[in-house]
Image (spheres, rainbow, N blue to C red):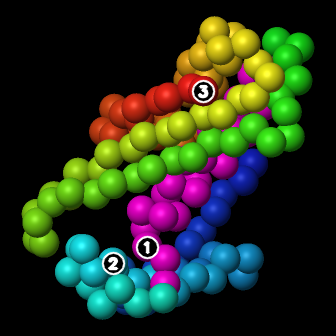
Amino acid sequence: MTQPYKAAVTALGGRSGFAASSDGRLRVELSIPAVLGGADGPGTNPEQLFAAAQAASLLAAIRNVAQARGVEVPADSNVTATVGVAGAAGTAAKLSVAVAVDLPCIDIEEARQIVAEAMRACPIALATGERAPPVVNVD
């Protein structure tokens, strides 16, 4: 299968540095949160970036699945992804992922079915599903 789109991002300095995309659309400062032993600088971190990717990708998949079913997804529908990291410095860290999905005005059972199908279509969820299976809550 050919890939019509590829994103390339280069990090410099690890968790305390910068990351930038090859097309110049993304450039972020990276900082280690104090709770992880860092200086808690003004930058973002890989977990926040991953949470943003998870939330955006899943909401797009939800919209695609709903559209295929003839269900209109309200504009104020949203997905909140929470990514946690645990592990001592120098050891293999373990990610945890939780997603909360809010699909107002859609019957809760239908919403759950749409989200379950979207989880099987979402490239981010598929890429990490076995290593960091998300806990999903649909409101």
- The circle drawn on residue 53 is none
Q: Which residue is mark 1?
A: 45
For the residues marked 1 and 2, what is the alpha-carbon distance in whole angstroms?
A: 8 Å
Q: Which residues are magenta?
A: 43-68
Query: Along the line of sight, which residue is nearer the eye, 118 or 22?
Result: 118
The residue that appears at 33% across and 40% down in the rendered structure is 132
Residue hosting label 3: 139
- How far from the left and from the top, in percent, is residue 31? 40, 84
Return the residue at label 2.
33
Q: Mark 1 touching mark 2, by CB under 8 A?
A: yes
- Nearest to the observer: residue 109 or residue 11: 109
What separation in Å lies between label 3 and label 2 (alpha carbons)?
Answer: 30 Å
Please name the amino acid that badge 1 sits on.
Asn
Task: Compare marks 1 and 2 and give the one earlier in the sequence.
Answer: 2
User: Is 24 displayed left or right of 71 in the figure?
Assistant: left
Residue 133 left/right relative to 137 = left
| Percent x, y of residue 56 | 66, 48
- Name the amino acid type tagged 2: Pro
Which percent across, then down, holds residue 89?
13, 72
Is 59 within the magenta?
yes
**Which amino acid type corresponds to the residue marked 3 in the rendered image?**
Asp
The secondary structure type at the circle numbered 1 is: loop
